[in-house]
Image (cartoon, rainbow, N blue to C red):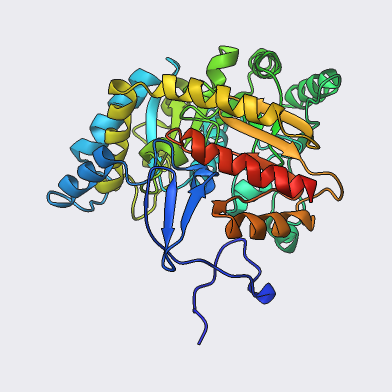
Amino acid sequence: MSSPVWHPFTQHGLGEPIPLVTHASGALLHTADGRTIVDAISSWWVTTHGHCHPRIMAAIAAQAQRLDQLIFAGWTHEPAEALARELVALMPLTLTRVFYSDSGSTSVEVALKMALGYWAHRGAPRHKIIVMEHSYHGDTIGAMSVGARGVFNQAYEALLFDVVTVPFPAAGREQACYDALQTACMADAAAFIVEPLVLGAGGMLMYPPAVLAQLRAICAAHDVLFIADEVMTGWGRTGTLLACEQAAVSPDILCLSKGLTGGSLPLAVTMASEPVYQAHYAPDRSKMFFHSSSYTANPLACAAANANLAVWREEPVMARIATLAARQAERLEALPGAENKRLCGTIAACDLPGEAGYLAAAAPRLMAAAREAGLLLRPLGNTVYVMPPYCITEAELDLVYRVIDEAIAG
């Protein structure tokens, strides 16, 4: 009998093999059939310092002996309190409040509800959300609504709410994006949500910090809330702790997840500015923020996140990121035949010649070839990207680019 598991983003009708991974360490996965696999995509962009990082694993084990789970509505615990204090100290000064959730998608849902609640409680409700072309913010209904419409969500179109879309600020076409954003802001929009510097699932599309700064300035000029979705770009992926740092941008609302626990356990935060919090602060219970999940601020996940922040404080993480970024740049430049090579921090991407789009036939062929060669890759259509843990070795990175080079040649 085949496995009863229904895997995400997997067409089981194709009968493709699904390897069974038994354990992992660093940038390596080990399978039940004795193979070693280099994780070139940080297991969907979450693993920063490496799999099973000893400090994070120890923190989880220690917390498991004290408190495993607690209702967070009206109750609290020290791992969540400590994490919130440190996040407020670490992130942009405008972000004074921390709301916990479970994943990147739910952090976006929280951000959207905060933005709409902000305007409703001010007595001047605004309902329109502005988004960027090709964006992706998750797979729940609100997150899908503010993402690009296409094969990801066409079956659920009837459930999605309307948004205003501004064009992607491709090189030489930035002004069209600025003009569209200004027009949308002038029409009393509630908020603009954006992936800073890199649009992930949209094809690792990249734009410079100066553009991000201008987008923020337009929103500020028209009193439109600016939501930075740093679920993927945060925690060093773009070369700085946050992508927003490179543009000296402070958002009104910030979404963080993935690398928040070093990739060990699911946890997300939505950080808000004081005005957004104060709009919900009142003696009137009807104005409270109506959002939660059963596992909000799970103590085990918060303990993992605190250990992750300790790694950032006490280990040379930024030096590792700089070294990996330089290595990525060298190897990407040396790839013959690759099109549209692009790099942002530790994120390297290029396009394979031929058919484009998410369902391009190149993707499953490359995934299969990589799997056989001992490598985990997951192309976005004809876009190949490398986003490894910061601990990946020279030899492991050599394997990654050798496989990509052979795929392009083939």
> Viewer-proximal residue, 287 or 38?
38
The residue lying at 55 percent from left, 66 percent from top is: 7
Residue at the limit of the structure toward the bottom, as seen here = 1
Looking at the picture, does residue 195 appear above or below residue 171?
below
Q: Can residue 201 be seen in this view?
A: no
Q: Is residue 181 shown left or right of residue 37? A: right
Q: Where is residue 68 in the image (x, y as percent from the top left)?
A: 21, 53
- Find residue 5 and report its horizontal and vertical position in percent: 49, 73
| Residue 175 shows in the view | yes
Measuring from the top left, give residue 110's x and y in whole percent: 49, 41
Q: How many marks?
A: 0
- Residue at image coords 30%, 24%: 86
When the figure is inspected, residue 173 is found, relative to residue 229, above or below; the finding is above
Q: In which quarter of the image is residue 191?
A: top right
Looking at this rendering, what residue extends furthest in the left direction? Answer: 66
Residue 99 shown left or right of residue 15 in the figure? left
> Image check: 35 left or right of 207?
left
Residue at screen point 77% across, 45% down: 408
What residue is rendered at 59% in x and 43% in y? Answer: 400
Q: Which of 151 and 293 is in front in this view?
A: 151
| Position of 32 relative to 90 (above/below) | below
Of 154 and 182, which appears nearest the observer?
A: 154
Q: Position of residue 36 (x, y in %)?
A: 45, 55
Residue in front for this viewpoint, 176 or 8: 8
